[in-house]
Image: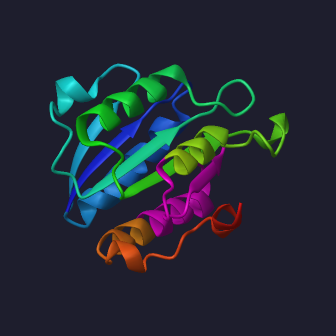
Amino acid sequence: MRILLAHTSLSGNTRDVARAICARCEELGHAVTWIDADIQTLAKVCPDGAGHDLYVLGSWSINAGRTPPEMKRFIEDLVAAVGKPDRVAVFGTGETQWGEEYYCGAARRMGAFFNTPYPRLEIEQMPHGAHDATKIQRWTDTILALANAPFENIPHADAPRLHA
């Protein structure tokens, strides 16, 4: 499977999660296109953006759970290049100390924008220890398994949004 993995990271926490996801995908034999949205653009790394089976996007959150401008630009470029892909999985890092309503807000906003049925991965601050490593691996395995399923058969991971 061809996977485009794009992330933005301020402190390196989200980048660490992205590295773990990338390593797991490659370990399982998938081809990963890596984009650090802080310093790379879709046009430079992958000019047409197309040809990927799964798009994995990760971000930290700014200003009350908002998406950083670098990821907003990446998403704008992605949508301009390929439209809104169906198969988008999102992950984020955050700090609950700023309030549960803001925690991983960027990941929640990206998931809502793409209306993704895939579960979100949320990591408190930085990935550390066996618990987070296992959580990242299980999430990655889950999104890869779902990516191989017929799209219409994937149950929506955020069921309350379906009723809103």
Can residue 126 be seen from the camera position used here? Answer: no
Q: Residue furthest front?
A: 164
Measuring 48% from the left and 69% from the top, which residue is drawn there?
A: 138
Q: Image height check: is 2 above or below 28?
A: above
Q: Quadrant of the C terminus?
A: bottom right
Looking at the picture, how far across and down is residue 48, in whole percent?
A: 15, 35
Q: Nearer the viewer, residue 60 or 162?
A: 162
Can residue 114 be seen from the camera position used here? Answer: yes
Is 57 left, or right, of 40 in this rendering?
Answer: right
Q: How many marks?
A: 0
- Check if residue 107 falls in the magenta segment: no
Looking at the picture, how far across and down is residue 126, in whole percent?
A: 61, 42
Q: Quadrant of the N terminus?
A: bottom left
Measuring 31% from the left and 77% from the top, which residue is drawn there?
A: 150
Looking at the picture, how far across and down is residue 108, in whole percent?
A: 62, 47
Looking at the picture, how far across and down is residue 136, in whole percent?
A: 50, 59
Q: Image height check: is 3 above or below 45?
A: below
Measuring 27% from the left and 39% from the top, which residue is drawn there?
A: 34
Tell me which colouring the rendered structure shows.
Answer: rainbow
Measuring 36% from the left and 38% from the top, which residue is drawn there?
A: 6
Is 71 left, or right, of 31 in this rendering?
Answer: right
Is 101 left, or right, of 29 in this rendering?
Answer: right
Q: Quadrant of residue 88?
A: bottom left
Q: Which residues are magenta?
A: 114-140
- Check if residue 138 falls in the magenta segment: yes
